[in-house]
Amino acid sequence: MEPISSICPIDSSCANQISALLSPPSPPLLQEYYHTLLSATHFTAIKVQQDASFSKGVYAAMDFKEGDLVLKDHMLVGVQHYHNKIDCFVCSFCFRFIGSIELQIGRRLYLQQLNASMSHDCDEMDSFDEEEITEQCGSSSSSKTKIPLPEGVVESLMNGQLILPYSKEFSMPPSVPCSGGCGEAYYCSMSCAEADWESSHSLLCTGERSGPEHREALLKFIKHANETNDIFLLAAKAISSTILRYRKLKANHFEEQVKFDKSCVANNDNFSLLLEAWRPISMGYKRRWWDCIALPDDIDSSDEPSFRMQIKELAFESLQLLKTAIFDKECEPLFSLEIYGQIIGMFELNNLDLVVASPVEDYFLYIDDLTYPNKEDAEKITQPILDVLGEDYSICCQGTAFFPLQSCMNHSCCPNAKAFKRDEDRDGQATIIALRSIGKGEEITISYVDEDLPFDERQASLADYGFRCRCPKCIEEEP
Ligand SMILES: [Zn+2]
Ligand SMILES: [Zn+2]
Ligand SMILES: [Zn+2]
């Protein structure tokens, strides 16, 4: 087989620019970036610091008590998992649930029915999706033994004609459709819609505003990602946001030039603007995806080289589709396989889950907690719906995201903090809570794995993140 390095011409034609983009940020730049990020979110009680070997860590800048909020971290980019879009209707920017309890339930039942009736298309899907679809087919076939909802109930839940008892207690922001007309992105507010449009969606929207050619290419890219790995959608958002930041910087720069009557913007200047636009992505620890992805259990170590080559080819396939859709000559290095692989590797290594609890779960728990006769009255209407939803009624919004500050937190098997959503945390931000008191100056650590696992299993899981844990617990338990 032809070596793939010769297939991506941008890797060699932009080699110098690529290595400039990938060189680790200088300590002052890094300090400035995290300082700005922390002041913008008003979390001044922590600091990001580098140790002697330049690896990052998060440190307490004041004392914390057990249960204190340490940090709320805004995601840099995030996506909802493809199959989760059936179950949860959320803002495409902040991942807050939108619409109403009725719309959440009606929409889910409607899409499940639609999915079940199309289940014969399952064989077109790859194994991952097949599993999901079979699961859903499975649950809908088991629901055949249950009494189906009377005709029209799903429709009237969706169009607002049927109001469920006490649903007003769980009000959500009304949904705002994407102004680009894609019918895919919905938001909790105009401000989320605008922020998403400006940060990446204007390049990734498949609506009328995008033009037919662009649209067709984008749809191909998205289909490929949905069928293989949605980490590609995250990478596309990272690249789009860098391009859009670059264009904005360039426009501002040009205005300045005109103001001071300077000559035209030189090429060198353009690249320094691209470097600046790239800065948020430059901060994350990176390796090439095909080098750092963990070898799946069912693959023999003798097949490792061919597995890694397949992953590289998959990335190249996805990149070519993305390039057809949104290529920008001035940002050419971003479309090299090297950069694409490093961005995806950064997400793979940080692998942070996006989770938002479902108000539908809260709703049914609330009904269950009512007392006689209110409970009986309400359940006359809600019980048949709960029966049809089955055990999946409580499914939360799930996805993957990159959190710039949380990703700087180091691991410990006896951590002093953890990611934990409190009742009031209703969007996709990461929330970090102190597990015990933390003194000023102490490093804040979280556990990347289940810290109650035995020593060997912990070390094996942590090897996927590329390190061997030397925390006090591991030193003590080391055989
Ligand atoms: Zn929102
Ligand atoms: Zn759109
Ligand atoms: Zn450990």
Image (cartoon, grey):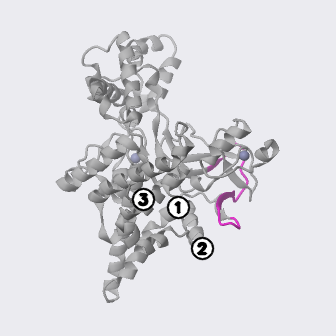
Q: Nearer the viewer, mark 2 or mark 1?
A: 2
Cα separation, mark 2 vs mark 3, equals 26 Å
Tell me, yes or no, whether the highlighted magenta stretch contains residue 56: yes
Residue 224, image x, y percentages: 33, 45
**Secondary-structure class at tag 1:** helix
Tell me, yes or no, whether the highlighted magenta stretch contains residue 16: no
In this view, 167 is above or below 35 = above
Residue at the extreme left: 212
Left or right? Give the position of 52 relative to 247: right
Label 2 neighbourhood size at 10 Å, few (<14), some (14-19), many (20+)? few
Quickly name the residue at label 3.
Answer: 340
Left or right? Give the position of 423 relative to 479: left
Residue type at mark 2 is Pro
| Lower position in the chain sequence, tag 2 or tag 3 | 2
Cα separation, mark 1 vs mark 3, equals 29 Å
In this view, 169 is above or below 389 = below
Cα separation, mark 2 vs mark 1, equals 18 Å
Tell me what residue is drawn at x 65 percent, y 42 percent: 460
The range drawn in magenta is 51-70
Tell me what residue is drawn at x 44 percent, y 75 percent: 16
Left or right? Give the position of 357 relative to 317: right
Quickly name the residue at label 1.
Answer: 40
Residue type at mark 3 is Tyr
Residue 125, image x, y percentages: 33, 35
Dominant secondary structure (helix, strand or loop) of the stretch shown in magenta: loop
The quarter of the picture where the C terminus appears is top right
Tell me what residue is drawn at x 39 percent, y 20 percent: 138
Left or right? Give the position of 120 relative to 411: left
Would residue 211 be visible to someone looking at this image? no
Disc number placed over residue 28 in the picture, else none: 2
**Secondary-structure class at tag 3:** helix
